[in-house]
Image (spheres, grey):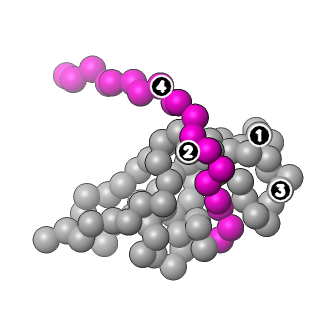
Amino acid sequence: MSAQKRLFLRLGDEVLHLRHEQWGRGVVVEEMTSTLEGGTCLVRIDFEDGQRRTFHNDLDHDLCCYYFGVRKCGTTKVPHFKLPRH
């Protein structure tokens, strides 16, 4: 039986990092949540400095990006693309 994850960030959320102001604002561009027990929840964030960074996204995990200084500051609409089924 799989435990429900407590996700901090969602696709399109705008964020800041409290310890890395030089990165600028970021936008969550990808969410990856494992459905396997013990699996990882990750988000990819594009920051204004041009870098894409990956963070843990489960609030019940000690490595969650919230505990390392990532904070929400708004939401941006990010287009959703459906992949064709083969």
> Can residue 29 be seen from the camera position used here?
no
Q: Identify the residue position indicated by label 4 in the image.
A: 79
User: Label 1 neighbourhood size at 10 Å, few (<14), some (14-19), many (20+)?
Assistant: few
What secondary structure is marked by label 2?
strand
- Quarter containing the C terminus: top left
- Disc ID at residue 21: 3
Identify which residue, 50 or 74, lies in the foreground: 74
User: Residue placed farthest to the front in the image?
Assistant: 74
The CA distance from mark 3 to mark 1 is 10 Å
Point out the tag, 2 or 1, that comes first from the N-terminus. Answer: 2
Q: What segment is highlighted magenta in the picture?
A: 68-86
Amino acid carrying label 2: it is Asp
Point 57% across, 40% down: residue:
75
Q: How far apart are marks 2 and 3 (CA)?
A: 17 Å
- The numbered mark at residue 48 is 1
Of marks 3 and 1, which one's residue comes earlier in the chain?
A: 3
- Residue 13 numbered tag: 2
Residue at 60% x, 73% y: name it: 67
In the drawing, does residue 15 fall left or right of residue 85? right
- Residue 85 coordinates in the image, percent (x, y): 21, 23
Q: Which residue is drawn at 76% across and 64% down?
A: 18
